[in-house]
Image (cartoon, grey):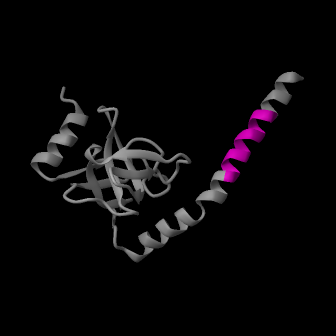
Amino acid sequence: MTDIKTDIKTLLQTEGRFVGTTMGVSMRPMIISGRDVVVVEKKKERLKPLDVALYMRNDKDYILHRVLKVTENGYIIRGDNCYKDEIVKEEDVIGVLTQYFKKERPIFMDDKKYLRYVKRRLFWYKPRKFFVITKQKLRKIAKRIIKGK
């Protein structure tokens, strides 16, 4: 059995493109794991803010997250459903999302609806983070209270 991770990197290097599904929840609600199909092209130039980068973490895991800021040596990146930024080196980024299929409907990165989604997602990040963290803390307190009875 071949290693799918090796195949993705090889496909990008040889064919210039990878088409497949993703695993995980970090890019929800934009991409639903196991359902939506992504099209990732080999990175040919420096990425720009709002691009969605495919990069390798610890030389073993493939991660698809959004570029928030371009730095001298890489990028500040975060998944749409994440609350922690990550510093990613330029050499770790191997591809960029060029389109995806949401329930078989193609979405391109220059689509007006998609760009509105991205801007809304970034605009509401801080309030969303506040409410998620508050909800987590309240659940923790509630569990302690219930256990204490």
Residue 10: image location, x then y, percent: 15, 41
Q: Indicate the quadrant containing the C terminus: top left, top right, bottom left or bottom right.
A: top right
Q: In this view, which residue lies farthest toward the front?
A: 72
Q: Is residue 19 above or below residue 23?
A: below
Query: Which range is magenta?
Result: 130-141
Residue 107: image location, x then y, percent: 35, 67
Q: Quadrant of residue 58?
A: top left
Q: Quadrant of residue 44?
A: bottom left
Q: Is residue 91 above or below residue 5?
A: below
Left or right of 141, for residue 53 = left
Q: Is residue 87 above or below residue 115?
A: above
Q: Quadrant of residue 39?
A: bottom left
Q: In this view, which residue lies farthest toward the bottom?
A: 112
Q: Indicate the quadrant containing the N terminus: top left, top right, bottom left or bottom right.
A: top left
Answer whether residue 139 is magenta in the image.
Answer: yes
Residue 122: image location, x then y, percent: 53, 63
> Residue at the spot x=22%, y=42% of the render?
8
State the residue in front, 119 or 23.
119
